Image (cartoon, rainbow, N blue to C red):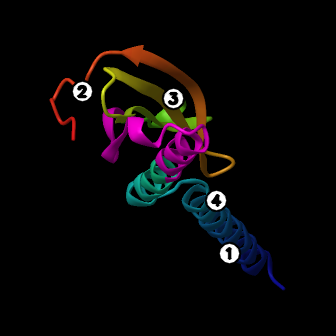
Amino acid sequence: MAIGECKVWNFYISSMKLLFSAIAFALLFVGCSERTDRIEKKLESYLQEDLKFMVAETMKAGSRDALLDTPYYRVKDFRLFSGAEAEIYSAYAEVDYFIYKDMALHEKRKYRYDVSARQWDRYYKTLFFGADSLGNNN
């Protein structure tokens, strides 16, 4: 091979390495991020399960009469993060659950979406006195 052919061949190889590196990086980036609608659907499913569990625990304690006819929850705050903020947790939600009929009492729970586990994590829950601010007591 002539020297000119070697230079062309080396240029071709380094161009291919660069192309493969760019494709690998793009696949890694796409593989590590998750669509917003999927994150929201996972949250909705998680909230429904929490509501069912709260109702079941109240019924198990023998307080069936204390429950609303239709217990519900209200998402008070929902945020998506991007960039450096989203390295560990990419979303946040604050939710109020209303299950009691004759008590102005609700439970507040906070959730965060763990990027590496690709699932929601509940990290805070507490009871508060006060009715639903939108007056949706069934």
Disc 1 from disc 3: Cα separation:
39 Å
| Contact between labelled residues 2 and 1, with CB atoms less than 8 Å apart | no
Please give the residue where the numbered disc 3 appears in the rendered image.
85
Q: Quadrant of the C terminus?
A: top left
Residue at the right extreme, as displayed: 1
For the residues labelled 3 and 2, the Cα–Cα distance comes to 31 Å
Q: What x and y, as percent, mark residue 14?
A: 71, 66
Q: Gap between marks 4 and 2, in whole Å?
A: 44 Å
Q: Earlier in the sequence, mark 1 or mark 3?
A: 1
User: Magenta includes 36?
Assistant: no
Task: State the residue position of label 1.
Answer: 12
Whether pointer 4 and pointer 2 mark residues with C-beta atoms closer than 8 Å, the reply is no
Residue 132: which numbered mark, if any? 2
Q: Nearer the viewer, mark 3 or mark 2?
A: 2
Secondary structure of residue under mark 4: helix
Are dots 3 and 4 in contact, CB under 8 Å? no
**Whole-percent x, y for residue 49 in the image:** 52, 52
Left-right relation of 136 to 77 = left
Viewer-nearest of discs 1 and 4: 4
